[in-house]
């Protein structure tokens, strides 16, 4: 950090500040539902004086010419592009256009960290970036900006100690992200709701002008090292935490922002395993409750850590509504071979019921195409899911991302059928040959799982399962089901939505019937209490917002 600060101070004495654009490409298929934290974080870490603009392709779909025009209009002197593997082809296309316009490009994120030579054209292919930042950029970013200001960008940047060893930034002095000045409103999800849906929401007291999901991290790193995952390699096995105070302060700031905007803010705690240190997580959740900082939140927690009822109860009381759980497989052998043997399929149902009793819903994630998978894996998984309380299942194909142990194993055993799958990205398409199922069959299994989980009949079944809960819960669950369906079946056009609403008319009618019953009765009082987020979860399922 010090090196960066000194560099910046010296540079500022001699050069004028620059305008910087941070750009995140879209994946060309669907739109992400929330802002990407890296852009907001790097903007907060940019030394004062420079102007930083943010463009997220998910809310502003620019083509190459439009991006170049934006750069000219805003006199941008440096473009930073971040990307996961999935969007890297688009990222390179946009970077090429920017560089052709004579503006330097620095790239960062998980993909170029693993394959810097690809981005820098050192693997025999074309060059896409002037510079690549390897790993976490928090400490090194001010140096990059200072070098760009002097017109002396280096090819690669990494945070290193005096002996040249890689250093992971401490999160102890995490910057304040001024969300109120960052225009997160471009991710106002209400804009995408059809009128009819707004009408339904207004009848259960949800008359918000805006609804945004804001990403917050409380820690980085994961000790588990699952074979397919890049997190342990990228962030390290030792987990680093922000102070509890800084997290709670951020939540409180978001709560005042939602009041100002007459909107609603939910938070996605993006930590890869929010409860990795259960003692610390409980302290955080207790502090959220004590300081009245509850907002509805989503988090990612592995199932083995959710056996702890005290933790589950604190999650509920602190506003936790949805927990993303990487169940991955119902086959213990598959799990063991992926290094995820701590997932025990026989206890999935029991733990999901515990969550449900506390008014928490699970987003259960499954991966098909593992070596133990055989034809029929979708049906077997769906049968198991049917026995659980309503949840939101998501299904993907095992994908070897660069830098993961899985990629290296598949490459060394000659099983990659699309070794650079990211340069010809196709959603839900295998890039290696599994042992016991053909790639084509694995793709069909995923299709079946999505089609069956989000069919109108499955949605109606879930609505029935939620009948004893609050109406707000049911509406939110229903809308989430429609949105999740869109992960596999893109539904970007208004006509797609009209069709889906029509197909799901029986679920909608059941919601309207409950609404009318409630209007007649005095239960509306209960629902209006939802408006006051300080009441979140305190009284259990009937008050939960979904
Ligand atoms: C939140 C999240 C999402 C969100 C979407 C993104 C969003 N709006 O935030 C959701 C839930 C939608 C999602 C979906 C997916 N995700 Co995701 N997601 C994450 C998660 C948990 C957090 C991302 C984050 O904000 N991290 C915190 C920030 C601070 O870290 P960072 O982004 O890496 O940024 C730092 C550095 O990389 C660097 N940096 C990043 N960009 C740039 C740019 C510049 C210019 C510079 C200088 C530096 C720089 O500096 C930053 C600060 O240190 C990560 C795991 C993780 N812990 O990062 C996975 C992760 C990014 N996802 C991953 C994957 C695979 C996916 C999916 C493909 C999964 C799937 N099968 O569908 C989808 C694809 C989504 C799409 N858009 O197409 C992988 C990516 C691996 C890879 N090589 O690409 C990760 C790493 C998880 C994993 N298990 O390996 N994801
Ligand atoms: S899949 Fe989850 S538990 Fe496994 S290494 Fe990645 S972040 Fe950790």
Image (spheres, rainbow, N blue to C red):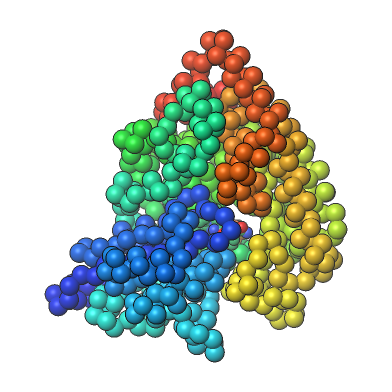
Residue 326 % position (x, y)? 64, 52
Q: Nearer the viewer, residue 475 or 274?
A: 475
Q: Residue furthest top?
A: 521
Q: Nearer the viewer, residue 519 or 107?
A: 519
* Residue 397 as seen in the image, left or right of residue 271: right
The quarter in which the C terminus is drawn is top right
* Residue 81 as seen in the image, left or right of residue 504: left
Q: Residue at x 44, y 47 (%)?
A: 187
The quarter in which the N terminus is drawn is bottom left
Can residue 253 be seen here? The reply is yes
Residue 263 % position (x, y)? 39, 35
> Which quadrant of the figure has residue 7?
bottom left
Q: Residue furthest front?
A: 495
Figure disc tally:
0
Residue 180 versus residue 82 in the image, above or below: above
> Which quadrant of the figure has residue 507?
top right
Q: Residue at x 35, y 45 (%)?
A: 250
Q: Residue furthest bottom?
A: 124
> Which quadrant of the figure has residue 368?
bottom right
Q: Nearer the viewer, residue 183 or 531?
A: 183
Q: Residue at x 13, y 75 (%)?
A: 13
Q: Residue at x 82, y 54 (%)?
A: 377
Can residue 5 be seen here? The reply is no
Residue 112 % position (x, y)? 50, 74
* Residue 382 as seen in the image, left or right of residue 220: right
* Residue 429 as seen in the image, left or right of residue 302: right
Residue 360 % position (x, y)? 59, 35
Residue 519 versus residue 454 in the image, above or below: above
């Amino acid at each position: 950090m010090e090196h960066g600060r000194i560099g910046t101070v010296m540079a500022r004495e001699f050069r004028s500040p620059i305008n910087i654009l941070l750009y995140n490409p879209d994946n060309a298929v669907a739109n992400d539902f929330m802002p990407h934290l890296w852009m907001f974080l790097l903007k907060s870490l940019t030394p004062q004086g420079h102007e930083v603009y943010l463009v997220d392709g998910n809310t502003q779909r620019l083509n190459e010419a439009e991006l170049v025009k934006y750069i000219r209009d805003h006199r941008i002197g440096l473009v930073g592009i971040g990307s996961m593997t999935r969007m890297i082809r688009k990222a390179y296309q946009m970077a090429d256009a920017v560089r052709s316009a004579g503006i330097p490009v620095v790239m960062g994120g998980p993909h170029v960290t693993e394959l810097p030579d690809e981005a820098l054209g050192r693997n025999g292919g074309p060059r896409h970036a002037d510079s690549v930042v390897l790993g976490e950029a928090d400490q090194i970013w001010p140096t990059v900006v200072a070098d760009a200001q002097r017109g002396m960008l280096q090819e690669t940047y990494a945070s290193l100690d005096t002996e040249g060893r890689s250093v992971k930034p401490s999160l102890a002095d995490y910057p304040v992200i001024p969300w109120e000045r960052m225009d997160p409103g471009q991710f106002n999800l209400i804009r995408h709701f059809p009128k009819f849906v707004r009408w339904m929401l207004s009848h259960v007291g949800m008359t918000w002008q805006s609804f945004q999901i804001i990403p917050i991290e409380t820690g980085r790193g994961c000790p588990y090292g699952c074979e397919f995952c890049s997190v342990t390699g990228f962030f390290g096995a030792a987990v680093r935490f922000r102070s509890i105070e800084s997290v709670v302060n951020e939540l409180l700031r978001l709560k005042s922002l939602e009041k100002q905007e007459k909107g609603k803010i939910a938070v996605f705690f993006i930590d890869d395993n929010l409860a990795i240190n259960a003692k610390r997580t409980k302290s955080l959740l207790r502090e959220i409750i004590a300081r009245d900082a509850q907002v509805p939140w989503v988090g990612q927690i592995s199932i083995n850590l959710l056996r702890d009822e005290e933790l589950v109860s604190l999650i509920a009381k602190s506003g936790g509504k949805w927990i993303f759980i990487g169940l991955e497989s119902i086959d213990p052998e598959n799990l063991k071979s992926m290094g995820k043997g701590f997932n025990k399929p026989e206890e999935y149902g029991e733990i999901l019921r515990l969550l449900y009793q506390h008014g928490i819903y699970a987003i259960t994630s499954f991966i098909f195409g593992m070596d133990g998978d055989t034809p029929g894996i979708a049906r077997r998984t769906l049968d198991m899911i049917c026995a659980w309380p309503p949840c939101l299942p998501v299904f993907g194909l095992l994908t070897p991302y660069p830098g993961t142990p899985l990629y290296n194993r598949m490459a060394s055993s000659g099983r990659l059928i699309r070794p650079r799958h990211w340069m010809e990205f196709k959603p839900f398409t295998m890039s290696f040959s599994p042992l016991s199922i053909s790639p084509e069959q694995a793709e069909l299994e995923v299709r079946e799982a999505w089609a069956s989980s989000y069919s109108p009949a499955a949605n109606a079944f879930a609505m029935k399962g939620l009948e004893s809960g609050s109406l707000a819960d049911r509406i939110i669950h229903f809308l989430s089901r429609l949105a999740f369906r869109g992960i596999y079946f893109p539904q970007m056009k208004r006509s797609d939505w009209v069709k889906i609403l029509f197909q799901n008319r029986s679920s909608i009618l059941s919601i309207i019937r409950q609404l009318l019953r409630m209007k007649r009765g005095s239960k509306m009082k209960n629902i209006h209490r939802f408006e006051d987020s300080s009441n979140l979860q305190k009284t259990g399922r009937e008050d939960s917002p979904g």
